[in-house]
Image: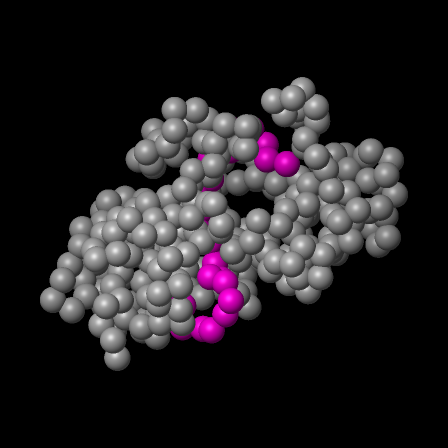
Amino acid sequence: MRTDTYPLIMSPYFRCGQSTPWGGCALKEKYGKNTPDEPTGESLEISALPGRESHVLNGAYRGKSLREIYTLWGDRLTGKRGKDFPLMLKLLDARQNLSVQVHPDDAYAQLHEGKTGKSEAWYILDAKPGAKLVYGVDVKDGELQAIVEAGQLEEHLHWVDAHPGDVFYIPSGTVHALGSGIQCYEIQQSSDVTYRFWDWNRVGQDGKPRELHLRQALDVSSPDSLPSPREEEEVPFEGGKMKLLVSDPHFRLYAVDLDGTFSLPTGEMMFMTPTVGCTLHWGEESQELAPWQSVLIPAEMGKAEISGNGRVLLSCA
């Protein structure tokens, strides 16, 4: 086995300004991100999207983009062969409601966009009292198109309360919108295919309403297939416990509550974001991690451990 792979501490790409008119300043003020001096909605912590790549902060490959690393390491990084890097990790800050949107599955996205589809999951980091988000629509079979064409979608949105620690699984076809006053961790397929149903009559810099994609959104929506809540199973280990929060064909999301040292699984790629400071150990090396600093663990890595006290969010391909 070659040994030039190592844990990659990533520098995020920020979406801000008119690309995220709903964004705020919490990513800088609460999560320590070096965001631009304007409202910022998204910190793309681990991203290989063209033009929106995160970059390596440490080691021999410092300064290289994730796309460059994937070209160099391939399935040694991901553990799976594929044309494109498969997943993306974001932190989001919603000062205002995001647009009401839906994502296609792989088959529709490939046919119509030449890209992969998008399933995702949200872990709520913080939420102001009374914060809500859109999670599905309240319609009967066959009603959605008529409701949309009548301009009545907003009246039928299904709103739910959001609290720190809540988890929402959003497979392709699920109508959704993050609500104002919420920050979240998002794990998703590496895709930018988003169809807007509704955008609260917001206008862009040109004074015109932002584009909607009603035909495509109706094509891919599955209003009757909202996921059932998952039973969270705790797995104790020496040094803490672990919960599986979401299991999707493309990714799994865990919460690891450290109280000592945890040996990371081997043989699969992992995205790791600690909510507190902790230490990552591998081979004869170690690295102190700041809170909210995201790390990409290559699938080829041998034994690695994290030590500390507090919660670590861990996503696996």
Residue drawn where x is 47% and y is 36% of the image: 15
Q: In the figure, residue 243 lies in which quadrant?
A: bottom left
Residue 149 versus residue 10: which sits nearer the camera? 10
Residue 135 versus residue 63: which sits nearer the camera? 63
Image coordinates for residue 147, horizontal then vertical, percent: 84, 40
Query: In the shown orientation, is residue 280 left or right of residue 113?
Result: left
Residue drawn where x is 35% and y is 60% of the image: 69
Please say whether residue 203 is visible from this viewpoint. Answer: yes
Colour convention:
one colour
* Residue at the extreme top of the image, as rendered: 207
Residue drawn where x is 43% and y is 24% of the image: 38
Residue drawn where x is 34% and y is 49% of the image: 55
Q: Is residue 87 above or below residue 73?
A: above
Image coordinates for residue 8, horizontal then vertical, percent: 29, 57
Which span is picked out in magenta? 77-99
Image coordinates for residue 155, horizontal then vertical, percent: 76, 34
Q: Is 98 colored magenta in this rendering?
A: yes
Residue 259 versus residue 5: which sits nearer the camera? 5
